Image (cartoon, rainbow, N blue to C red):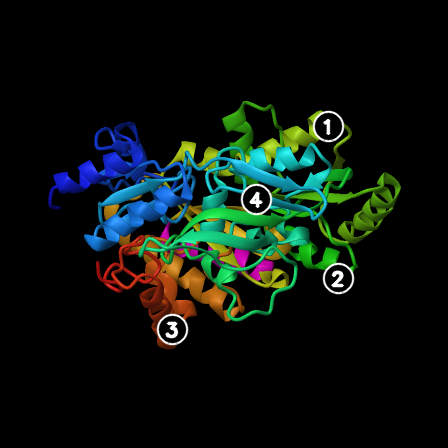
Amino acid sequence: MNAFPEDLLTALRQMLGAAYVLTENLEAFGRDETEDLLYLPQVVVQPETAEAVAAVLALCNQHHIAVTTRGAGTGLSGGALPIRGGVVLATNRLNRILNIDEQNLQATVEPGVVTQVLQEAVQAIGLFYPPDPSSKGSCFIGGNLAESAGGPRAVKYGTTKDYVLNLQIALPSGELLWTGANVLKNATGYNLTQLLIGSEGTLGVITKVVFRLIPYPQQNVLMLVPFHSLEGACAAVSAVFRAGITPSAMEFMEREAIVWAADYLNIPLVLPAEVQAHLLIELDGQQLEPLYAEAERLYEVLSSFDCGEILLADTAEQKEQLWKLRRNVAYAVKAKSVYKEEDTVVPRAYLPQIIRKVKAVGAQYGFQSVCYGHAGDGNVHVNVIRGELSEEAWQQTVQLGIREIFEEVQRLGGTISGEHGIGLVQQDYMDIVMQPIHFELMRGIKQVFDPKGILNPGKIFGKREVPT
């Protein structure tokens, strides 16, 4: 890789201030939560305004310098890794909640705002921003937008994309524009706002976002339901919805997931040998009595499946501990071993089939998997554990198994990513769910937005799809 031009460094320092143009100790900007990958950038810039972002892009575009936008580094598909070196554009200084409009139930924020910070700010005035990925305490809004993040409450409330009214973006040309309007209905031309969500920083850099909000649900009921088989837990999911019950969260954890999380958090947990999986189910609303009535109906549905004694969380502390277990599964798995996390999503009635396939493929190819995820919307995270596998098995044999799993996902009407994105590590599987015409259309869109291919090159399409 060629040395970064000194005159461009000087120009960046003049734009942003020398303290916000970094050229040393950049390892933290070359990693995220994806496996153990490391790709070092040549330069990291930390702009504070939308105008500064636009100026950086214009300079890099003029000189054909790759720009990878980065949030908090919590991604799981390598989407923010600077695989072509160049510039990492860090959004940590774009971290302001600019406005909360209580009358119109809207919030305008910058991409470097931590998701939980936004949630708590609006909750303080009785409003609700529902998307809540497991990393909500550290992930940035911009990263949530880049991958259209979901989280446990997507089953009732939807994902990030369902709360975005308008985006301000910077284009490689240095232009700033708003993609839509701050309204609930908009039939004015192509929906550029939704096009940008999930585009992983390959089309433009989001500099502001206007979210819609809803009233905060004041009450909730949380229960932990043990099952004696993985398939029984999965089969119960569809039955709950067919009974007319829509939980605000319905999370699946197989035995190892909850045991590893408890061990990671040093929480005492003794599970009967026959318990193989759990569903963590939440109901929410404004009044407690209707929730208890719905919980009774839920008990009736679950009793027809092979489940054990259901734990109803009695206190706020107990609820917090159960959610802490669920939200720390990924960290617990990472603490155990290097792993590949596959983000499968299928129609929820087919959850038993996909879990059965995952375990069969693991047995065939010799790898352990730990499964958990958002069962209510059919989104199961399959963690393939490296353990003692050789480099050859990890890089080749395991890939064959993952492909078989994804082929089954596609056969069932699902797809290969529900909320983690394609980024770097899922590119080799895109052909399973997309035809050549899909790639042709997406390449055409990329060409219009980013004709020189400087924005997050080598992602989604493949390393050779878009020139730099």
Three-letter amino acid code of the residue under disc 4: Thr
Residue 447 picture location, percent across and down: 31, 67
Disc number lying in front (2 or 3): 3
The answer to whether the residue labelled 2 contacts the one labelled 3, judged by CB atoms less than 8 Å apart, is no
Disc number lying in front (4 or 3): 4
At label 4, counting other C-alpha atoms closer than 10 Å, the crowd grade (few under 14, some 14-19, many 20 or more) is many
Residue at (13% x, 38% y) in the render? 6
Residue 37 picture location, percent across and down: 29, 42
Disc number lying in front (1 or 4): 4
Which residue is disc 3 drawn over?
Answer: 441
Which residue is disc 2 drawn over?
Answer: 242
Which range is magenta?
351-366
Task: State which quarter of the image contains the C terminus.
Answer: bottom left
User: Going by the image, does 242 lie left or right of 363?
Assistant: right
Three-letter amino acid code of the residue under disc 2: Arg
Which residue is disc 4 drawn over?
Answer: 108
Disc number lying in front (1 or 2): 1
Three-letter amino acid code of the residue under disc 1: Ala
The correct choice, above or below, for 465 with respect to 96 in the image is: below
The disc, 1 or 3, on the residue closer to the chain's N-terminal end is 1
Three-letter amino acid code of the residue under disc 3: Leu
The answer to whether the residue labelled 1 contacts the one labelled 4, judged by CB atoms less than 8 Å apart, is no
Cα separation between marks 1 and 3: 49 Å
The disc, 2 or 3, on the residue closer to the chain's N-terminal end is 2
| Disc number placed over residue 316 in the picture, else none | 1
The disc, 1 or 4, on the residue closer to the chain's N-terminal end is 4
At label 2, counting other C-alpha atoms closer than 10 Å, the crowd grade (few under 14, some 14-19, many 20 or more) is few
Mark 3 falls on what kind of element? helix
Cα separation between marks 1 and 2: 29 Å
